[in-house]
Image (cartoon, rainbow, N blue to C red):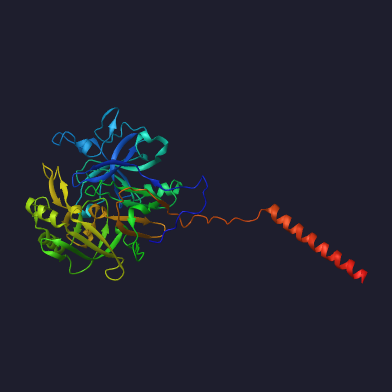
């Protein structure tokens, strides 16, 4: 990906990338996902990251009812409020909340996610209340209070779609756009890795606004980058040229006979794939389809065999359906996730692939981003996907993505005084040479 590195200036006023604080926990009911800490209206929450949304989502108390598990609020990311477990985001407690109204939540409607949300404006801080002024904070952001179990946890919005609540209303810009517009981040860009609980030392996710960390990915050999889709609802689209696997129950196996385009979307956990690819996964890994839950489960015997064989799944991705490409490899362990309430009453191993009804549903979700490091540059209209790496002794190396509109630092030059001195010196030299010439001519 072609991104602009940090400028040479070391000015104290330089806007630097912002690393969103990690919660140091893995949450979720459809897998174990690394979450981040935010504060909305004075209330702490643990949330995921959404590469599609432009609005901040938080879970409200109505999201946990009497029939739900007792620890439902904590499971869904609610933090501690007044020394006790919060029931979820409560707009009545916030001193900065202003109502917009109740509307349908249609962010993932094409994947059959449903629900309504309480929309309003509030102050959003990317960090817990305890971080104080060290957190990146911005007022009057669109916040959505969600109860639906389809959106089990809230999220930080990394997309740039505008919000609009009536045909005559002025559209409202996304959180990321406003952070850039208010000069709180160096560019309209971000880097994201989902984290990987199954890897050695269980590395947590990483989210950087306005930069990236070179210690967390292996650069693509061909410097491949992806251009944005012309469909604004599927901006981060890639061509899935092939999917291959090794060491499966069927040995080496090809999952696809043809290529397809797919959206990369961290809002959802699953890989939504064409039916023939799902059938191939089912055969290669001995999966069992559960039609009631629309999920693929795996029995203990096949799981034990596959653990010993350690399969690897390779996705070949390109800007088009053929041509230049890069490979992202996922170990078998990346696909063994746990589904709990409300999918199953007991935590159950499952394979996070879903049957897509049509090409509008083709999606690569968080499962994919466990092993892919994503850098998105909205101002240059491109993004990259590289193999994530997990160094044993990580040492962050942050690089700023500068804005194309940022002024080019001026080169060191001579001061007005120095220029005047040089001019004076040259003038005196000319006078001295003229005088000597006149003296020698007169003597001759």
Residue 10 sits above or below residue 82 on the image: below
Q: Position of residue 202 (x, y in %)?
A: 25, 46
* Residue most extreme to the right: 443
Of 119 and 381, nearer the camera is 381
* Residue most extreme to the top: 83
Of 212 and 356, nearer the camera is 212
Of 317 and 201, nearer the camera is 201
Is there any visible trace of residue 172 in the rendered image? no
Is there any visible trace of residue 271 in the rendered image? yes
Q: Position of residue 180 (x, y in %)?
A: 43, 49
Residue under the point 76% across and 61% down: 426
The image quarter containing residue 280 is bottom left
Q: Position of residue 194 (x, y in %)?
A: 28, 50
- Screen quadrant of the N terminus: bottom left
The image quarter containing residue 279 is bottom left
Residue 138 sits above or below residue 238 on the image: above
Q: Is residue 70 left or right of residue 439?
A: left
- Screen quadrant of the C terminus: bottom right
Residue under the point 36% across and 56% down: 376
Q: Position of residue 317 (x, y in %)?
A: 27, 64
Residue 146 sits above or below residue 429 on the image: above
The image quarter containing residue 365 is bottom left
Q: Is residue 212 left or right of residue 347?
A: right
Total labels drawn: 0
């Amino acid at each position: 990906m072609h991104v602009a590195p940090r400028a040479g200036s070391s000015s104290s006023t330089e806007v630097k990338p912002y690393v969103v604080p990690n919660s140091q926990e893995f949450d979720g009911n459809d897998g174990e996902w690394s979450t981040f800490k935010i504060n909305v209206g004075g209330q702490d929450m643990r949330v995921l990251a959404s590469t599609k949304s432009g609005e901040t989502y938080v879970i409200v108390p109505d999201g946990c009812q009497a029939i739900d598990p007792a620890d439902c609020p904590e499971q869904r990311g609610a933090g501690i409020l007044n020394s006790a477990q919060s029931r979820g985001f409560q707009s009545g407690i916030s001193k900065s909340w202003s109502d917009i109204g109740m509307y349908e939540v249609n962010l993932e409607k094409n994947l059959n996610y449903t629900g309504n949300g309480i929309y309003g404006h509030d102050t959003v801080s990317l960090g817990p209340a305890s971080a104080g002024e060290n957190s990146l904070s911005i007022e009057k952001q669109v916040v959505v209070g969600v109860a639906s179990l389809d959106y089990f946890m809230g999220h930080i919005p990394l997309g740039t779609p505008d919000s609009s609540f009536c045909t005559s209303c002025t559209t409202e810009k996304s959180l990321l756009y406003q952070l850039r517009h208010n000069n709180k981040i160096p560019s309209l860009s971000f880097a994201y890795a989902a984290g990987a609980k199954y890897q050695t030392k269980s590395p947590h996710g990483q989210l950087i606004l306005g930069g990236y960390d070179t210690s967390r990915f292996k650069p693509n050999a061909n410097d491949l980058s992806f251009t944005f889709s012309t469909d604004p609802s599927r901006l981060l689209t890639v061509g899935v040229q092939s999917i291959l696997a090794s060491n499966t129950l069927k040995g080496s196996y090809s999952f696809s006979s043809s290529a397809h385009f797919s959206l990369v979307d961290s809002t959802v956990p699953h890989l939504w794939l064409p039916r023939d690819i799902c059938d191939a996964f089912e055969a290669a890994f001995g999966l069992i389809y559960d039609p009631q839950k629309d999920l693929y489960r795996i029995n203990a015997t096949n799981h034990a065999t596959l653990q010993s064989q350690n399969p690897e799944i390779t996705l070949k991705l390109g800007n088009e359906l053929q041509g230049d490409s890069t490979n992202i490899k996922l170990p078998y362990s990346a696909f063994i996730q746990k589904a709990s309430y409300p999918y199953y009453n007991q935590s159950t191993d499952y394979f996070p692939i879903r049957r897509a009804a049509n090409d509008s549903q083709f999606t690569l979700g968080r499962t994919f981003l466990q092993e892919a490091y994503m850098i998105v540059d909205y101002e240059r209209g491109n993004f990259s996907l590289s193999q994530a790496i997990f160094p044993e002794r990580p040492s962050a190396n942050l690089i700023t993505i500068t804005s194309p509109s940022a002024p080019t630092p001026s080169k060191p030059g001579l001061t007005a005084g120095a220029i005047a001195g040089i001019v004076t010196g040259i003038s005196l030299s000319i006078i001295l040479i003229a005088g000597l010439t006149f003296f020698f001519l007169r003597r001759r």
